[in-house]
Amino acid sequence: MLIKRKAPWWNVFYLIEVISGLLITMKHFLFKKTATLQFPEERREYSDRYRGLHYIKTVNNVENCTACMLCPTVCPAECIHIVAEERADKEKYPARFEIDLLRCCFCGMCEEACPKDAIKLSNIYEMAQVERIVLEKDVLLDQRGGK
């Protein structure tokens, strides 16, 4: 058998609950540090292990990549496309090297699989664009990102 108790008259207006809720809101509003960053002026600090935009390392203005096709092979997103050609000294090089950033999951497997340590992931994290981003070889050779 359920016993019904009569509530006090002030609980009908929920005044105490409303005031306690407002006190909690004001406590968070006035005394807590905000988590918002004012982006162009304040930059977020990421760890050294952050994986951002890709780049290709060069030695004496010649890319390290030998177009061995290991990075497109291990890429789970299949976002890397390489077209290989030969130089005059019978060494392979990538004539076209493209990375589709919309498909890339930034896992770093391409960086780990490269035997020549040619492809790297920088710490550039500003990648917002209006249109589809496909990084080509000339862009990959230019950007560094502080590494």
Image (cartoon, rainbow, N blue to C red):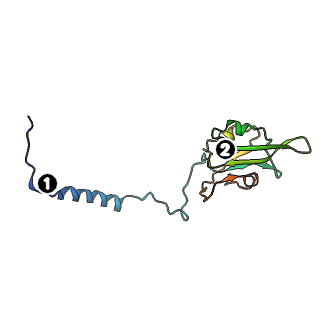
Q: Is residue 42 left or right of residue 17?
A: right
Q: Is residue 37 left or right of residue 71?
A: left
Q: Could you tell me residue 115's position as x and y percent?
A: 75, 37
* Quarter containing the N terminus: top left
- Front-lying residue, 130 or 38: 130
What's the residue at 10%, 50% (across, down)?
Answer: 7
What's the residue at 18%, 57% (across, down)?
Answer: 16
Q: Which is more N-terminal, label 1 or label 2?
A: 1
Crowdedness near tag 1: few (<14), some (14–19) or many (≥20) residues, C-alpha within 10 Å: few
Q: How many marks?
A: 2
Residue at the far bottom: name it: 41
What's the residue at 30%, 61% (across, down)?
Answer: 26
* Residue type at the position of mark 2: Cys
As helix, strand or loop, the secondary structure at mark 2 comes to loop
Tags 2 and 1 touching, CB below 8 Å:
no
Q: Could you tell me residue 11's position as x and y percent?
A: 14, 54
Q: Which residue is mark 2?
A: 79
Q: Which residue is mark 1?
A: 11
Label 2 – label 1 distance at C-alpha: 61 Å
Q: Is residue 62 left or right of residue 45?
A: right
Q: Quadrant of residue 41?
A: bottom right
Q: Nearer the viewer, mark 2 or mark 1?
A: 2
Q: Could you tell me residue 128's position as x and y percent?
A: 59, 57
